[in-house]
Image (cartoon, rainbow, N blue to C red):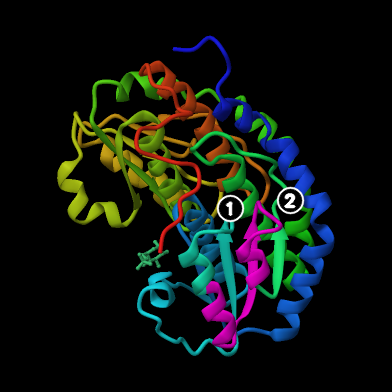
Amino acid sequence: MSATITHMRREIEEIPEATARLLDGSAAVLTEAGRGIRERDPNFVVTVARGSSDHAATFMKYAVELTAGLAVASVGPSIASIYGARLRLGGSACLAISQSGKSPDIVAMAQAARAGGSLTVAITNTADSPLARACDYAIDILAGPERSVAATKTFVNSAVAGLALMAYSTGDDKLLAALARLPEHFRKAIGCDWMALAGALETQKSLFILGRGPSAAIANEAALKFKETCAMHAEAYSAAEVMHGPLALVGPDFPVLALAARDASEPSVAEAADNLAAKGAAVFVTSDKATSAQHLPHVATGHPLTDPLALIVSFYGFVEAFARHRGLDPDTPPNLRKVTETI
Ligand SMILES: N[C@@H]1[C@@H](O)[C@H](O)[C@@H](COP(=O)(O)O)O[C@@H]1O
């Protein structure tokens, strides 16, 4: 274990200021792109992304479906990059999310979406990138350089940029106000101590991470981070879907982390956590509504769409500490590079 602070920890601590910088510095382009989307008045939305950026896209899928009344579909980049297939995307908007903005498959799919009639918006941490140039609008998430292989502040800022874009396009002042309060909530979320989880996890090889709606996207992001930084297998499920086949694995040697946000799904996630605890599993949940699963501290942000983002910030703080607790350096996961370029 290193006595010096890791890049990952430093970048988690930078999240509040990075979010404030995005909301301020990219307000003009977010307003302009929001207006562009409103004028296009799309009938549906497609997303193009991979990895953590894809989890931000899944988060946006729920946010758009819940508040803008539009169905959202994820398009596999290989549709363009390998198969060269043409999609008829007239009447749609396309969100392409990539922190580097240069993976050839993501760029090819964004170009194909634009050629197919979609209004394309890039959400990227690299303003002068091929993806930014390929799209009708490019939102710079202004997260600053991210040196840790595991994305943290770029994930949060991609999701915040997506929410801000939606708020500007639909004229949602309540959401804009909630976003403006986020830096302060993130500061508190970094301070939430989840190390109670460590004892239950350290002798295990795998766990389930659950969520519902927007927090299901957060569960996917958390599971990826366990693999990257803790060399531990984690699988994300909807708190409803886990009750089907996956339930067979849950028991005293199979822990569960349930990420409940303060939205309409909270009672169902808390109930699922209690049901799994009844199977003898160590179950942790970010809800005070659970009666037998163990409670983890969380920050209530006052808006159902920003709550899951406070959860991932608390989780990031935990997972970085847990990696070091396991004697691993979260900055240098085996086999991985910061920028993934796939075709
Ligand atoms: N969100 C996309 C999915 O929509 C896609 O199916 C998958 C595989 O894509 P590809 O076929 O380009 O490898 O990548 C991402 O996860």
Residue at figure coordinates x 62%, y 26% from the top left = 10
Residue 189 seen in the figure: yes
Q: Residue 191: which numbered mark, if any?
A: none
**Label 2 SS:** helix
> Viewer-proximal residue, 222 or 241?
222
> Which one is in front in this view, the residue at disc 2 or the one at disc 1?
1
Q: Quadrant of ligand 1?
A: bottom left
Image disc number at residue 100: 1
Q: Nearer the viewer, residue 204 or 272?
A: 204
Q: In the picture, which quadrant includes the C terminus?
A: bottom left
Q: Where are the magenta residues, as a range?
A: 110-134
Query: Residue 50 in the image: x percent, y percent?
Result: 45, 58
Q: Is residue 128 magenta?
A: yes
- Say which quarter of the image contains residue 161: bottom right
Q: Does residue 132 belong to the magenta stretch? A: yes
Mark 2 closeness class: few <14, some 14–19, many ≥20 residues within 10 Å: some
Tell me residue 99's x, y (percent).
Answer: 59, 52
**From what the image shows, is residue 217 above or below residue 275?**
below
Query: At 57% from the left edge and 47% from the top edge, which residue is drawn?
Result: 155
Which residue type carries mark 2? Ala
Q: Amino acid at mark 1?
A: Ser
Specify few, some or many for label 1: CA neighbours under 10 Å numbering under 14, 14-19, or 20 or more.
many
Mark positioned earlier in the residue sequence (2 or 1): 1
Q: Residue furthest top?
A: 3
**Marks 2 and 1, how far apart at CA:** 28 Å
Query: 194 above or below 110?
Result: above
The residue at 55%/47% (across/down) is: 308
User: Residue at label 2?
Assistant: 178
